[in-house]
Image (cartoon, rainbow, N blue to C red):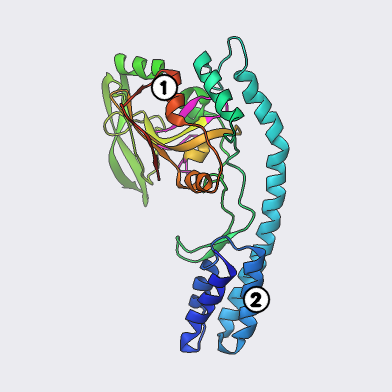
Amino acid sequence: MAVRDVRNAFAQVAADRRITAQDVDRILSSAGAISRDEQAAMRAEADKFAGMMDPDAKRKLQEKLGEVDTLRSHAARHNRNVELQASRLSAEASAILGPGATTTFGGSKVPDAVKALVKEQLAAGATAYDVRELKPDPVYDTSHGEGEVKLDGKFNPYAQESGSSDTLAFAYTELTPEKIARDMTTVQTFNVIKGTTTVNGRQVAEYESVTRKGSGSISALYDEAHHPDTRARGRDGEKYASNFAILGDGSVHAVPASRRSQSNPGLILTTASLARGKQMLFNGHLHMSNGVVTYVGMSGRLGKLQGDGTKFVDPIAILKAWGFQVQPGLTVTPE
């Protein structure tokens, strides 16, 4: 956005010669990420239209712009810490991609074809990034009711930092062709999610125990219920949900079907949860049917960065280098 959008927003809400607290939401939202120039423009326009602003509108705008300053300073400190860790994380991934027999964060042997491809694409300018990195300027968000000034992730909206335990252990979330094939050919007993029920005022997942082979399917799964069994599978036997990422060592990971982990049971896991303190090469969504990859989507945040010139690895090429079966002609879908 631009200063022009801020000025236009003020002009539009002042058309009736009165600016209310509700109008302030529109003014703050007009900037998108609130840059210093846009912040200064809001203050200048507020002075210009001071006679039309309700007292509570003046207080609200002043309060929110003060929060912008505080959060911008926090983002700068946070990103500095992320930057200080970058060389260590890059060296860690580079060692795994180096010569000889090496294993991923999840313990799987890295094929030479994966090493060669990832190193080639990084050398060609592909970005290894940390999802904890924040955009430098705060945004004003009204998507959850009352508007709030907040910081937004640069590479993923959710700059989460989760640990690698339970269903977020690297070995559990890691996808390899061998793991998928083994799951599809092994008879196992597990819970599948069959619905939800209300217990003491909150939604709790209900399960059905089944004995069967894994489905080899991955699809979009989401609910807001409490999950007593964080390893429960989707209704069709999916072990994983579609949120996936390629980490700096070239390994492929997906969140568990329950999208929960015992370490933080109230948190709905997102793609960003898969970082667990490691760098990423790609994040988005992946679908699979009977062990065949049928869809790969690039997250909207990465897509916008790519449109601005940032390079990312080719996820389909990496999947093929691992030996995954991929639907013929599959291309990456912008999301």
Left/right placement of residue 254 relative to residue 140 reads left
* Nearest the eye: 247 or 7: 7
Residue depicted at 64% across the width and 54% down the height: 136
At horizontal 66% and vertical 29% (from top left) the residue drawn is: 90
Where residue 22 appears, as percent x and y from the top left, is: 48, 76
Question: Is residue 189 toward the left or the right of residue 17 in the image?
Answer: left
Q: Which residues are magenta?
A: 247-270
- Quadrant of the image occupied by residue 227: top left
Amino acid marked by disc 1:
Lys
Residue type beneath disc 2: Arg
Residue holding disc 1: 320
Left or right: 77 with respect to 319?
right
Residue situated in front as seen by the camera: 230 or 290: 290
What residue is pinned by disc 2? Answer: 43
Dot in front, 2 or 1 = 1
Kindly identify the residue that appears in the image at 40 percent across and 15 percent down: 178
Confirm whether the magenta stretch covers residue 266.
yes
Name the secondary structure under disc 1: helix
Callout 1: few (<14), some (14-19), or many (20+) C-alpha neighbours within 10 Å?
some
